Amino acid sequence: MLTVEGLRSRYGRIEVLHGIDLTVASGEIVSVVGANGAGKTTLLRCLSGVQPVSTGTITFRGDLITTVPAHRRAARGLAQVPEARQIFTNLTVEENLRLGAYLFADERVDKDMAEAFAMFPILKEKRNLAAGGLSGGQQQMLAIARALMTRPSCLLLDEPSMGLAPILVAQIFEVVKGMKALDVTVLLVEQNAFGALSISDRGYVMETGRITFSGAAAELVADPRIREAYLGI
Amino acid sequence: MADLLQFLVSGITVGAVYALLALGFTIIFNASDVVNFAQGEFVMLGGMITVFALAAGLPLGLAALIAIVLTAGIGVLLNKLAIEPARGAPVVSLIIITIGASIFIQGVAQIVFDKQIHRYPGISGDAPLRFAGATILPQSLWVIFGATAVFVALWLFFTRTLTGRAVLATANNRLAAALVGINTRYIMTLSFGLSAAIGALAGLLITPITLTSYDVGIPLALKGFAAAMLGGLGNPFGALVGGLLLGVLEALTAGYISSQYKDAVAFIVIIGVLFVMPQGLFGRKSTERV
């Protein structure tokens, strides 16, 4: 589904990704975990096309997309739920969802919106309110629902649990886990390593711009080095 | 009483033009955070192109259409050639670029057209109508009608069409807009084209009343900017109210105090707004949760 090879990226003169290799197979949930500042967000920004790549390649569903602009990647089925949600705060919940399906004007839009409301009933309740007034958890749900409106085959999630109460974190992780049933492949970036790995098939550990460990999620959770460094156990 | 009515009528007429200018500022500001000081040049171009198209023997309707389309094209070029290449530069630099563009357009207009003052007859002639002791030029009604039509059309565009909502979405959060597949560059181009077209329409409607020449743009841009600030930069409804209010204030000042102070009103308004309520009458209030 998604293959990254030798990816490097920089902010000005400072390189923050020093050659990332990563694959996500169709139907998988894959996590990238690591501390704040490891370059996880930059990696996702490269994948969605809002951050330029210096060298390396990104292949999505067999096509090289390294230089494809962000809005065309969305059209190809690669959706991102960005860090800090980035919803359209002064538009209503319903308008946010409708804009998720910006590329489409068929009857499936209404069907998808009904499904989004079924998945997140609170959004239906608040559909005519400005999205900026939603709570953090509701905004996160809206961001995920909006990304699903783009009809993605692969969803990139950036820190969906950030800043949420534990009960909401569990709820969001359940939603991510549910992507399998929707046939949506997931690449999840998280600081909450334990939570992320517990719903993933495989995981990568990232440290200062490099992948330092990778493997089956269960193995990573069991690895004493990772337990000590990232899981706080 | 007849005096007051007279002042109000001329105030609202000029105010409608300021409102269209402020609307042009608002559209570009929302899409790009840039205050486009070349906005006044669009008004000048609308009037001047119409003048020369009429002189070439074209009927008024066609001349007006050409003026709007050409000016919209110049707006698009301004974005493509001057703003887009500087993307990522601080907003202040972009604003200075628009001031440069304004001077450039003025200079070219001086060569392509001429330095004379021009006018052409109003759409429904120049015979004034009398109403309760005040005289109203039929062209005033056209200006007010034109401004109303633009505001209604834009309101429908922003609230009823997906493209309109995509413009609002891009204004609100460019990153998120790109991530749902909105081509934000296209939205910028569209905004510049739209603002320029609105400016041109304002220019060609007001020319029979206020006359035009190559150098009317900058003072108009400043008035339009004052109107936008007064209403709250970024709010289309604020642009409408700010424009009308500024026009009426100017007319009342000219009528009751002295016409020499008329032009000072806009600047007093800017200073007053900046001191007392920097958000303007209908400015954005930040009520977002983060």
Image (cartoon, helix red, strand yellow):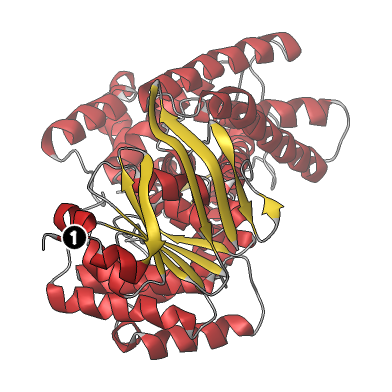
Question: How many marks overall?
Answer: 1
Q: How many C-alpha atoms fall within 10 Å of the one at disc 1: few (<14), some, or many (≥20)?
A: some
Q: Nearer the viewer, residue B197 or A220?
A: A220
Q: Residue at x 73, y 34 (%)?
A: B70
- Rendered view: A174 above or below A98: below
Horizontal relation, residue A104 to residue B256: left or right: right
Q: Is residue A226 above or below residue B277?
A: below
Where A174 falls versus B260 (above or below)? below
Residue B62 seen in the figure: yes
Does residue B290 appear in this view? no
Q: Which residue is mark 1?
A: A227
At 87% from the left edge and 36% from the top edge, which residue is drawn?
Answer: B58
Foreground pick, A192 / B66: A192
The residue drawn where x is 73% and y is 40% is: B69
Q: Quadrant of residue B181?
A: bottom right
Under tag 1, what secondary structure? helix
Chain letter of the residue beneath label 1 in the structure image: A
**Residue situated in front as seen by the camera: B69 or B60:** B69
- Image coordinates of residue A72 in percent, x first then y, are 63, 53
Horizontally, is B53 left or right of A168 in the view? right
Residue B63, percent from left and from top: 79, 37
Q: Quadrant of the C terminus of chain B?
A: bottom left
Q: Position of residue B244 (x, y in %)?
A: 37, 46
Residue B277 image position (x, y, % from top left): 15, 41
Is A182 in front, or is B117?
A182
Residue type at tag 1: Arg
- Residue located farthest toward the right when viewing the structure as drawn: B57
Q: Is B92 left, or right, of B155 in this rendering?
A: left
The residue furthest front is A224
Q: Please report the residue visible at 62 percent of the width from the left and 65 percent of the height from the top.
A: A103
